[in-house]
Amino acid sequence: MLTPQFSLRRLLFVVTVCAVLCLVPAVATRGYVWAIAAAFAMAGIGVLFAIQALLYVVSRGLGAALSRGPTNDEP
């Protein structure tokens, strides 16, 4: 039987981090300037990761479409 890769401690840590990340935009809706800035920063980082993923997919697709496989032109 396979052993689990994630322990309960790691799962609790991930849940705690997600809770804090969700708390920041909630505080930002109350008008705190630091929370608004942090929420915009988190959104900006998310947009940057999305753009990087999109460019990666496009480059992989173009690389596969434009690559030439082995040819049988050798004598």
Image (spheres, rainbow, N blue to C red):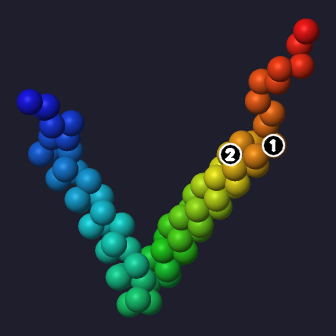
Mark 2 residue type? Arg
- Rendering coords of residue 60 (x, y %): 68, 45
> Does residue 53 appear left or right of residue 13 in this picture?
right
Mark 1 surroundings within 10 Å by alpha-carbon count, few (fewer than 14), some (14 through 19), many (20 or more): few
Q: Residue at x 35, y 82 (%)?
A: 26
Mark 1 residue type? Leu
Task: Give the distance between the C-alpha atoms of the residues marked 1 and 2, in whole angstroms.
Answer: 10 Å
Q: What quarter of the picture does the C terminus occupy?
A: top right
Nearer to me, 40 or 7: 7
Q: Residue at x 79, y 37 (%)?
A: 67
Residue 66, disc: 1
Q: Which residue is mark 2?
A: 60
Q: Does residue 41 appear anywhere in the picture?
A: no
Q: Are marks 1 and 2 in contact (CB under 8 Å)?
A: no
The picture quadrant where one finds residue 74 is top right
Q: Nearer the viewer, mark 1 or mark 2?
A: 1
Q: What quarter of the picture does the N terminus occupy?
A: top left
- Rendering coords of residue 30 (x, y %): 38, 90
Nearer to me, 74 or 46: 74
Mark 2 surroundings within 10 Å by alpha-carbon count, few (fewer than 14), some (14 through 19), many (20 or more): few
Q: Residue at x 12, y 45 (%)?
A: 8
